[in-house]
Amino acid sequence: MNRRTFIKGAIALTATAWLNPNNLIDAAEKIFWWQKKGVYQIYPKSFLDTNGSGTGDLRGIIRKLDYIKSLDVGAIWLTPVYPSPMVDNGYDIADYTDIDPRFGTLADFDELVAEAKARNIKIVMDLVFNHSSDRHPWFLESKSSRDNPKADWYIWRDEPTNWRSIFGGSAWQWCEERQQFYLHTFATAQPDLNWENPDVRRALFDAANFWLNRGVGGFRIDAIVYIKKPKIFVDGPADADGTCSVHNMTANTDGILDFLHEFKREVFDGRDIFTVGEANSVKPEDLPDWVGDHGVFDMLFEFSHVNIMFPHGEVWHRAELFKLSDFKRALTDSQLATRDSWYPIYFENHDKPRSVNNFFPHGTDKILAAKALAMILFTLRGTPFIYQGEELGFANVAFDSIDDYDDISSRGQYDLAKADGLGDKEALRFVQKFSRDNARTPMQWDTSRNAGFTSGEPWLPVHEDFATCNADSEARDPDSVLNFYRRLSKFRNSSDVLIRGDYHELYPNSEELFIFTRTLGDKKILTAVNFTTHEVKLPAKIFDGAKKLFGNYPDEKNFLRPTEAVILILD
Ligand code: NOJ
């Protein structure tokens, strides 16, 4: 039987999992360790700098392990820490089996794994296998001639197509040495690897096994939907500028699952780990091919609920207004599609704006919003993923000029907007709203200089709200977002109903309220959130006979106040 058979029905686990009693919540229905607790995502560059370089490092993470443990999570996902020219902040890897000196050494990494393990936390690595850096020795060799041993480790062509890369500009880059173009789905410095070549696949699987042998607890797998290219390379349906997004031509193409099943066999099978693939464009109805008994990963980050503003592709200036019913439908579809498997619940990551700005109307109280979203995060069915700072209620930044933005995609989107006729101000407005830098400003630890992030010059400015929004101050305030997260996380991790219960949505057409229940036997928990900035009447007497477990207002009314959210027990 398959290690990804989950909590319903008879289940066989891998030998390792059986031997470890901590993997199981009870003997009758088996639950893996990564289903029992949440995951904390760290963007190491912005977490904590211990040597005054202005960028965070592994020793900074070691120093804050007790802080992370206080959130009762079972794993830490590190975005890439491998040697990299940092064109895309580490997602351009120049060596898959080492640590970038900016972040530390392999010895620091081993210490991090050991110190985390001592706190019952596992370290999860980010595998970036669709592309490498253009400085990776594999690429240097591949580009040197058309007949070197690695000549077809990347994707080379004599003629480009009209494909536009995800960061803007042509997806093909001319190479003088080979007198050919190479494909890059993302930046020109991120050439796509050729997965058709078995030697490439072997080298990548070996790299993943290198980290498993160092004791990591799993992988988040980057941009995995792009690894299989179509059989023939042709121009796609052109936008006004004559280009066509590479995403529309190469995402999730036929045959990708064969590669992924091989990946699973060669790397994941038989290991007590979890895998979560990043899979923009895998639809809820396709999820059974990707996760669960017949799938390849334990969980999948699909983008439906975070991309509802972009129904026509992720072009920022073509964003549409946030519609609550779309957001709820996306979440409900995913919850139902993974009824027999598992789901990663997330509202933020290093690529998305801060959730208090992204999902609530202008003028919403940020603290109420942060707590309201946390109540959804911890009561939907699946593993909650907390992105650094989300547990403190971090908000977006707004830099004054495009030159202040570090994020490569912000600059690409700005150019795209200007090419479409938007003025400087208007183009900047979209960057401020959707820039990935919103999520990348340094962690705010205390009220000291640079929020305690660095004694040097931070690589990205610290948010100006750090005097009130910081870990130290919030730790001392029982009503803070941080303490709310701590209590909710512990509650979720000890609640059978929240871990195993069935999901059911109420009033799906409401544009004001998100209400759902989780049911296990005769126990029922209900979450209700008012997404508006005004009072909303409840459609039924849901408070009758119910006991409030959590809420972002101290008392109760028989209606929901602006951004009010409650978790009720109904049994
Ligand atoms: C997805 C990652 O989350 C993002 O940060 C990165 O830029 C692209 N993949 C390319 O690796």
Image: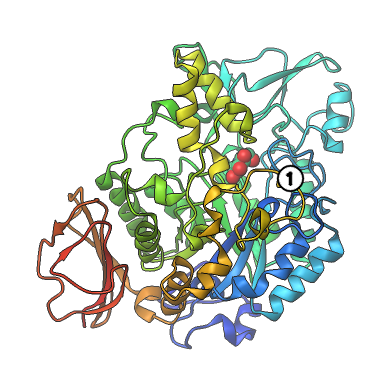
Q: Residue drawn at (66%, 70%), measured in percent from left and top?
A: 122
In the image, 477: left or right of 159? left
Say which residue label 1 marks. Answer: 201
| Residue at (49, 11) in percent of width and height | 241
Asked if residue 397 is positioned above or below residue 39 in the image, the reply reads: above
Q: Please provide percent x and percent y for residue 424.
A: 50, 19
Residue lying farthest to the left in this orientation: 540
Is residue 290 at all visible to an observer of this figure?
no
Residue 460 image point, x, y percent: 66, 43
Q: Badge 1: few (under 14), some or many (20 or more) residues near its Cα, within 10 Å?
A: many
Quarter assignment of residue 547: bottom left
Three-letter code for the amino acid on which mark 1 is drawn: Arg
Q: Is residue 185 left or right of residue 109?
A: left
Q: Quadrant of residue 309?
A: top left
Which is more toward the observer, 392 or 262? 392
Rendered view: 57 above or below 144: below
- SS type, badge 1: helix
Quadrant, the C terminus: bottom left
Residue 28 appears at what percent x and percent y? 44, 87
In which of the image's four quarters is ligand 1 placed? Answer: top right
Residue 228 locus on image (x, y percent): 60, 36
Eyeballing the image, is 23 above or below 379? below
| Residue 156 visible in the picture | yes
